[in-house]
Amino acid sequence: MRVDLHTHTRASDGTQSPEELVEAAAAAGLDVLGLTDHDTADGWAEAERAADAAGIALVRGMEISTRLDGRGVHLLAYLPDPTYPPLVALLDKVLEGRNDRVPAVLERLRTVGIDLTEEDVARVSGDAAASGRPHIADALVVRGVVRDRDEAFARLLNPGMPGYVDRYAAPLRETIEVVTAAGGVTVVAHAWGRRTARIPDAAAIAELAELGLAGLEVDHQDHDERARAELRGIARDLGLVVTGSSDHHGTGKVGHDLACNTTAPEELERLLALAADARRAAGRDAPEPLGL
Ligand SMILES: [Zn+2]
Ligand SMILES: [Zn+2]
C-alpha cells in the first residue's frame, strides 16, 4: 500500500485542480492520498468525487500556518470538522493575514524597481482560497523577473530579502487544541527543513505531544538523512506517528513528485486510529477517511 499524506492543489498554491491531483495520484500508483491545502478545506468536495471515481482512498486535511517562539511552523491537520466555529475563525484569520500581505509585498518590491500589480497576482492565483507569496512568485515568473518560484523566494520573497513582509500565523499550541476539539489529528510538517532553524526542537516536540500532537512528518524533501534519523528517534521515544510525504504542488515546486516520500501503512493505521478517537472524543461530525 502506497501512501502520500501531504499535497496541494489550486485551492492553495498547487498548480492542479483537486480532480487533476487525484487522477495524477492514482496514475502514480498511490493507494492513499492526503489532500492538505494551506489553511483551507476548499478542495475537499471536488477531491472526494474524483477519488471515488479513480478508486483511490482519500484522507482530507489541511496545512495550517502557525507560529512557535516567533518562527513559522506548518501543522498538518487531518480529518477535522471544517465547520467547527473556532477552527473556521482561526483559518479565516490566517487567510486574511495572507491576503493582506500581498499589497504590502508589492509595495516593497516597488522600492527595488519591480512594478507588479494586484491584478497580476490575481491572474495567477485563480481559484485559491487566498493569494500568497507563491502567487506573487508566479506573477514574477510571468513577468520574466525570475525563472521560477524558487528563484523568486531566494532573491526576493524570503525573510531578509527586499520583498519580505511578515504576516499573521496562528499560535501552534492553540491550533493543536482547536484541531483536536474539531475531531482531527495533527502532525508537524517538515519540522527541520534545510533553510529553517530546528523549531520545534526535541523538548518542544515533547511538550506538543503532551498537548495532543499525533505525529511528525519525517520523510520530506527538506530533510537530509541526519534530520530524518534524529526526528525518527524523537518520534519513537514519544510514541508519535511518523509520516512521509511528497508535499506535491503540481509544477509549482520542483523535486516534490507524488510519492517521492511515502508513509508506512502501519503508521497510517495508527494515525487513523487516533483520528477516530479524536472524532469520538470531540463528539463532532468530523470527516472519516474515504475508501479505507
Ligand atoms: Zn509546508
Ligand atoms: Zn505543504
Image (cartoon, rainbow, N blue to C red):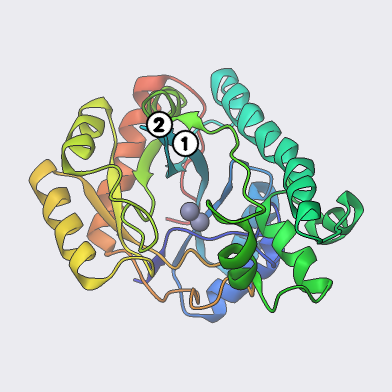
Please tell me whether mark 2 sits on a helix, a strand or a loop.
helix
Separation of disc 2 and disc 1 at Cα? 5 Å
Provide residue 96's location: percent of width, then percent of height.
70, 32
Q: Front-most of 252 and 101?
A: 101
The amino acid marked with disc number 2 is Leu
Residue drawn where x is 61% and y is 33% of the image: 94
Provide residue 263's location: percent of width, then percent of height.
32, 64
Residue drawn where x is 35% and y is 69% of the image: 262
Provide residue 81's location: percent of width, then percent of height.
53, 30
Q: Is residue 276 left or right of residue 31?
A: left
- Circles 2 and 1, Cβ within 8 Å, touching? The answer is yes
Q: Which residue is mark 1?
A: 66
Q: Is residue 159 left or right of residue 260?
A: right
Q: Locate the C terminus by quadrant.
A: bottom left
Q: Front-most of 104 and 249?
A: 104
Please tell me whether mark 1 sits on a helix, a strand or a loop.
strand
Q: Which residue is mark 2?
A: 172
Q: Is residue 261 visible?
A: yes
Provide residue 93's location: percent of width, then percent of height.
64, 27
Residue drawn where x is 79% and y is 42% of the image: 103
The quadrant holding residue 99 is top right
The amino acid marked with disc number 1 is Thr
